[in-house]
Amino acid sequence: YDDAMVINHINQSLSFNETEQEGLCNLNYDKVFERSSFIDKVKAEYQKELSTKKFMEYLVNDPKYEVVDEKTHEKYEEARDRFVVCDGLLFRKDFVLRTGSDHKEAVQRLYVPATMRTEVLVLMHDHDLAGHIGKDKYLPLFKRRFYWPRSTQDLIDWIKTCPVCQKHKVL
């Protein structure tokens, strides 16, 4: 596969439409991510991560939702404008560079629970259609779709340890 084909595939197949209709985000992931099992797993993992579950409840139910302590309330308030819950999924609202442009555009990035981060890295980087195009090409594609604290560094570390990338020096 050539780089342009891989980038085009990832851009088209993993993109999603941020348009909200009656509170729902219309997700159009490619075959890898559109499986209901993947989305269901993300939602189930949110419920297991107590801090994520409480934050999502806060976003959905505020101002009625009561946070146990003032420090947590302040932390949630600081983050409120950067996150949205759509159809049971948590998204971070960001501005990222448009592919092939100097202009930034608004995107909503899926928050990935800790237990699924390796799975997403494998699917984004190691999948047969993903290719091994290096961090400079993967970072913009990844940043448009997924978020977790330190996700950029995690992706860079993942690529640095990839034997194929090391062999072909695409770091």
Image (spheres, rainbow, N blue to C red):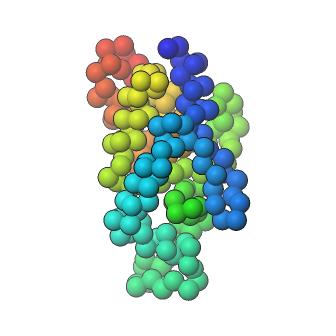
The answer to whether residue 23 is left or right of residue 89 is: right
The answer to whether residue 106 is left or right of residue 33 is: right
Q: Percent x, y for residue 54?
A: 43, 73
Q: Is residue 170 visible?
A: yes
Q: Residue furthest front?
A: 36
In the image, what residue occupies the spot 35% across and 42% down?
119
In the image, what residue occupies the spot 55% across and 72% down?
59
The answer to whether residue 129 is left or right of residue 81 is: left
Q: Percent x, y for residue 31?
A: 51, 36
129 versus 153 height, above or below: above
Q: Percent x, y for residue 141?
A: 54, 35
Q: Quadrant of the C terminus?
A: top left
Q: Percent x, y for residue 49?
A: 35, 65
In the image, what residue occupies the spot 48% across and 44% down?
35
Nearest the camera: 7 or 81? 7
The answer to whether residue 98 is left or right of residue 48 is: right
Nearest the camera: 81 or 125? 125
Total numbered circles? 0
78 versus 162 height, above or below: below
Q: Is residue 95 visible?
A: no
In the image, what residue occupies the spot 64% across and 52% down?
26
